[in-house]
Amino acid sequence: MESMPSVLHLIVCDRVRAHEDNLQVFDAIGVKWSHRSRQTPPFPCRNVGLAIFVVFMGGRGTTTFFFRIVQDRPREIITVSRRRRTIRFTGEADEAFGFNCRIENCVFPRPGLYWVELVLSDLVIARQPIRVYEAYHEGHP
């Protein structure tokens, strides 16, 4: 990779939708910074999947990337996107572009802080936190 891009946005959400009349406009639906387990027992907590929307600027060359979810303490990788993808940066240094993908079948082993990380050329270049909680119960705050 000749030069690394800057990550302008890394958004974790339920779904990303492109506008039919303008493919440069996207809607991030159900933006997430936390997740509450609603199952019994609450953990391990299964989530059907997370959508991830990324906007880059700059960069030059071709490289691979993937996403992973990492538990903060203990630091442990719990989910990795299905495959590494190849991306080629060919635009101008001041040109922004975005893409989206999904991480399916996320399983959070316990409550706590997790990080959704973007790994490009084997380096974490962006990450976004998501905190996982137990569901509220009667008499439980």
Image (cartoon, helix red, strand yellow):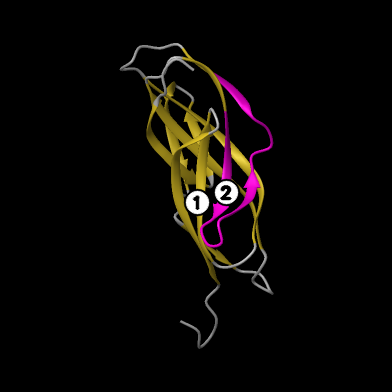
Residue holding disc 2 = 69
Provide the major secondary structure of the magenta segment. Answer: strand
Give percent across and percent down for residue 135: 55, 73
Name the spot of residue 18 as percent of width and height, x first. Answer: 49, 29
Q: Which mark is residue 19?
A: none
Residue type at mark 1: give it: Trp
The residue under label 2 is which amino acid type? Ile
Disc 2 vs disc 1: Cβ atoms closer than 8 Å?
yes
Region of the chain picked out in magenta, as a range: 65-87
Mark 2 neighbour density, 10 Å: few (under 14) some (14–19) many (20 or more): many
**Residue 93 lies in quadrant:** top left
Q: CA distance from mark 2 to mark 1?
A: 6 Å
Q: Residue at x 50, y 88 (%)?
A: 139
Q: Secondary structure at mark 1?
A: strand
Q: Look at the image and tell me whether residue 61 can be seen.
A: yes
- The reply to whether the magenta stretch includes residue 80 is yes
Image location of residue 107, percent across then percent down: 66, 56
Q: Residues within 10 Å of mark 1 (few under 14, many from 20)?
A: some
104, above or below 88, in the image: below
Question: In terms of depth relative to the viewer, which is nearer, 95 or 70?
Answer: 70
Q: Name the residue beneath numbered marker 1.
A: 115
Identify the residue at horizontal 60%, vertical 39% (top origin): 102
Give the left or right position of residue 99, taking residue 39 as reference: left
Q: Using residue 60 as the reference point, say whether residue 77 is left or right of it.
A: right
Question: Regarding mark 2 in the picture, which secondary structure is present there?
Answer: strand
Disc 2 or 1, which lies upstream in sequence? Answer: 2
